[in-house]
Structures are given as structure tokens and as C-alpha cells.
Image (cartoon, rainbow, N blue to C red):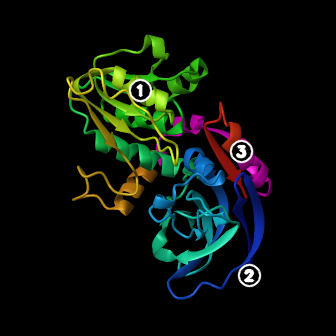
Amino acid sequence: MKARAFWVEQAGQGIIRDEQLSAPGPGEVLVRMRYSGISRGTESLVFHDRVPRSQHASMRCPHQAGDFSLPVKYGYIAVGEIEAGHGPIGQTVFCLHPHQTRFVVPASEVVSLPDGFPLERAVLTANLETALNGVWDGQVKPGHKVSVIGAGVVGLLVGWVLRQEGCTDLELVDLDPAREEVAGKLGLKLALPGEAQSDRDLIFHASGSPAGLSSALSLCANEATVVELSWYGDKAVTLPLGEAFHSRRLTIRSSQVGQVAPSHRAQWSHRRRLQRVLELLANHPELDALVDEESPFEDLPQTMARLATDGAGVLCHRVRY
């Protein structure tokens, strides 16, 4: 069997390669891709060869081929259906897999989607899992005054999860006033940086910009916590850790989806967390507002080059197979 797969061939250049597949063996399934999603922040860093060598091992994704020295086959948002192997034929599934028309994986690594699940929405799975884990890392308390900086996909989903969990004093902050419309569809109030409330107990930073992280620190109340969800690759970040950072006893806490948040780790496995995310996606059609672009798989080299260089204004881009 043959498949087609997207590879980052060299910095700033992607190609589609033909690949040979083996038939699924015992305990394996053959999946035909229906949609994949582009995780623009991380995949842009991969596309431009900006993953630090020290992070090559920890940043590997399941079923990655090659490595971050390039070429590499990378990606982790795959929605498809089982065509053969150890599983019900025609069952729609989610899997952590790079962009590829067909692939063979262990049946234990796919998660079945319920009947009637909107496949087009399933491309938000990885970002919603990141957002949910980030909210768990924040350990929101009743009465907390909470801000989210950055109205990209992750920031919007963090705000949405907080709203689902009953957070009432919540503000979303972004430079782009055009994000007000999509924020409103998710029940969120958007403020421009000059209008943002200060004296906040908890701030989630998801803008991907060091300037946004500095802004988060400026909005903190005494002994507040900033949860950092942005990843900068090999980019150095300068922060104002003088001034009142120590006297106000501020905390910056990193959040990364590769490990379940410590507050939930005893009861929640990766698979249980993923199943919870799929339940949320199945029941909330308002999240469709976050998917605002779609293109065919064969255009992916050009699409990735555009999004990785200047994706301003784009939220989630869906790839159609």
C-alpha cells in the first residue's frame, strides 16, 4: 500500500513524499485520514528549524519520522476512519499522527469518536487538551480574578474552559480588536491591552510573544501566578524580573501538555484527559468558530509556508484529505 506524507525538507520548505505502507499486523489498524489540523505555533518552529537541540528528544511526537535537524515528518492532529485491521471498519477515530493520507498504528493509539461526532471539529482536540491541562495547572480558586492574554486558538480555548468551569471574573486580552467577534461566540469579553484590568490573581499567557508575558506580569496582584502556555523554541526571552517582581512574590509557572497537570495526575491518565476533551468537543458547536481556514492536503507545502511565515489573523487551519 502507498501513502502520501508531508515532510519539512529544509528550513522554510515542505514537500509531499510517497511512502510505502505495510499491511496492519496483529493489534494494528490502517487509518485513512479525513482531516488533520495545523498546530501553528509549534509547527511553525519546526518548519523554520527552530527547535533547540536540547529539546529534540522531548519534542518528538508519536509516529514522527526523521528528526528536528531536518528532514522531519511532524504533526499530531489526525482525524480519520479505520479501513482495515484490528478494529471496526469505518469507525472514525482521533490519533496523534503527522500529516499523511493513510497510516498504520497500534489500535491502542486511536480513540474512537462517538456516532455523529462532527469530524471537522475534531481538529481542535490537541489545542483543547493543551488548554484544559493549562487550566488544571492554574488551580483556579473560587473568587479568583483571572485574565487570559492572547486570543489565539489556545488562549480562546483556555478562556472557554474557564467559563465552563464557572470562572466569573474573567477577561481575555489581545492586541487585535477583530478577535472580539469570535470571543463573543465563546461567551468571552475581550479587552485591548490599554483597557485590561490589573490586580489579577491568576493570568494565563498564550500570546506567543515575550511582550505579552511582560504584560501579564504588569497585571498581577500581590502573590499572583502567571501560567505560561507559550513555547518560544530557540528564541531568548527577556522579562522585567526586577522592579516589583520579588516584592510582590509573583510566580511564573510553565504548562506543557506532555504531562498531566500535577493536580490531576493521580486520577487522570493521558487517555482519560483526551476522552474528556472529545466529550467537550462533541457537545459544543460554538467551538466551530475557531476553525476559520481549510485547504486540501496537496497544497500543504504552500499552506505551511504561508502560515509559518505570516499567519496573522488565522486561528485554526484544517487540512482536508
Disc 1 residue crowd, few under 14, some 14–19, many 20+, Cα 10 Å: some
Residue 38 visible to the viewer: no
Which residue lies most toward the top here? 195
Residue at 35 percent across and 57 percent down: it is 259
Left or right? Give the position of 235 relative to 261: right
Where residue 143 appears, x then y in whole percent? 21, 24
What residue did someone put label 3 on? 294
- Magenta range is 281-306
Alpha carbon distance from label 3 to label 2: 27 Å
What residue did someone put label 2 on? 1
Q: Amino acid at mark 3?
A: Glu
What residue did someone put label 1 on? 214
Residue at 52 percent across and 43 percent down: it is 235
Residue 29 visible to the viewer: yes
Q: Amino acid at mark 1?
A: Ser
Q: Amino acid at mark 2?
A: Met
Mark 1 and mark 3 in contact? Answer it, CB < 8 Å.
no
